[in-house]
Image: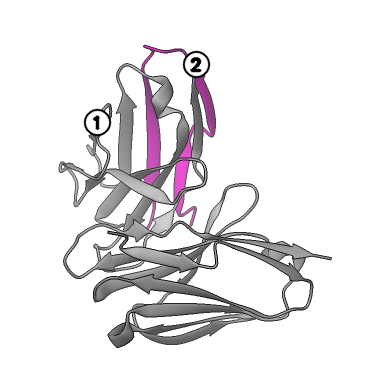
């Protein structure tokens, strides 16, 4: 089992460019999440999904969109990147809110 | 107010020493996890422990849910234990996993 995988691992964007981060899990989990981690801080929830075809806003959703077309995949999009979105992005999955969450390796994004 | 507090913020250990990290939370919890973030940024699951005690090798954890705290014990520390340790909880009046600010552990040879 690969667990939770993320692509790409690193990316540099210019202000105003767009991109999509891909998360995939092979544990048949219903719930999937996108977090961001800024220097010296814990992770904060951007968006989440409780099943295929569903998405919802988390703690810091502004500037991001998400889609969950297949149960195993969760996409995070930046339509017009800003320097404030420079961060490390983590994807996670779990059976539900109260069960253990498993995290991917992260994507380091720099917006110039 | 702060929902998840970790202490101490920083810890420097000599190889072979033991240590205790603490996580206090503001309400009853439905989920509590301990993570180790290594120097390469990878988040590693250590324990899923909303209550009780668990052990995994040199690491063990105890959560006393009624008193709203959890402890992570590191015994016979090694340099590979260096990194940031995060506590994260799902409070009973919330839906999301909330992270503490972390404890940065440095183990010196």
Q: Position of residue B52 (x, y in %)?
A: 39, 88
Task: State whether residue B76 is above or below residue A32.
Answer: below
According to the image, label 1 marks what residue?
A62
The chosen color scheme is one colour
Range shown magenta: A1-28
Q: Position of residue A102 (x, y in %)?
A: 41, 58
Q: What element does badge 1 sit on?
A: loop
Image quarter where the N terminus of chain B lies is bottom left
Question: Which disc is residue A112 wearing?
Answer: 2
- Crowding near pointer 1: few (<14 within 10 Å), some, many (20+)? few
Q: Chain of mark 2?
A: A
Q: Position of residue B29 (x, y in %)?
A: 26, 74
Q: Position of residue B21 (x, y in %)?
A: 54, 74
For this view, does B71 lie left or right of residue A94? right
Query: As rendered, which of A56 and B1 lies closer to the eye?
Result: B1
- Counting residues from the N terminus, which is met first, the one under dot 1 or under dot 2? 1
Q: Are marks 1 and 2 in contact (CB under 8 Å)?
A: no
- Crowding near pointer 2: few (<14 within 10 Å), some, many (20+)? some
A67 falls in the magenta region: no
Quarter of the image where one finds residue A94 = bottom left
Q: Residue at x 25, y 73 (%)?
A: B30
Say if residue A73 shows up in the picture: yes
Say if residue B88 shows up in the picture: no
Query: As rendered, which of B27 and A61 lies closer to the eye?
Result: B27
For this view, does A106 lie left or right of residue B51? right
Quarter of the image where one finds residue A20 = top left
Image quarter where the C terminus of chain B lies is bottom right
A19 falls in the magenta region: yes
Q: Chain of mark 1?
A: A
Q: Residue furthest front?
A: B1
Label 1 to label 2, Cα distance in Å? 19 Å
């Amino acid at each position: 089992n690969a667990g939770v995988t993320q692509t790409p691992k690193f990316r540099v964007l210019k202000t105003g460019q767009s991109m999509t981060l891909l998360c995939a899990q092979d544990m048949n989990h219903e719930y999937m999440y996108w977090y961001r981690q800024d220097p010296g801080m814990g992770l904060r929830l951007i968006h989440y999904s409780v099943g295929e075809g569903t998405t919802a806003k988390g703690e810091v959703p502004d500037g991001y969109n998400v889609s969950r077309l297949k149960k195993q995949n969760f996409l995070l999009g930046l339509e017009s990147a800003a320097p404030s979105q420079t961060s490390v992005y983590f994807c996670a999955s779990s059976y539900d809110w109260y069960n253990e969450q498993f995290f991917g390796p992260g994507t380091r994004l720099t917006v110039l | 107010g702060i929902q998840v507090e970790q202490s101490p913020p920083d810890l420097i250990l000599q190889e072979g020493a033991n240590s205790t990290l603490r996580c206090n939370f503001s309400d009853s919890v439905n989920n509590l996890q301990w993570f180790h973030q290594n120097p390469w940024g990878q988040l590693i699951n250590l324990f899923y422990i909303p209550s009780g005690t668990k052990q995994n090798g040199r690491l063990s954890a105890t959560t006393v849910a009624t008193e709203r705290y959890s402890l992570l014990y590191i015994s016979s520390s090694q340099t590979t234990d260096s990194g940031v340790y995060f506590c994260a909880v799902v409070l009973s009046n919330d839906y999301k996993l909330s992270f503490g600010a972390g404890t940065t552990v440095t183990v010196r040879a």
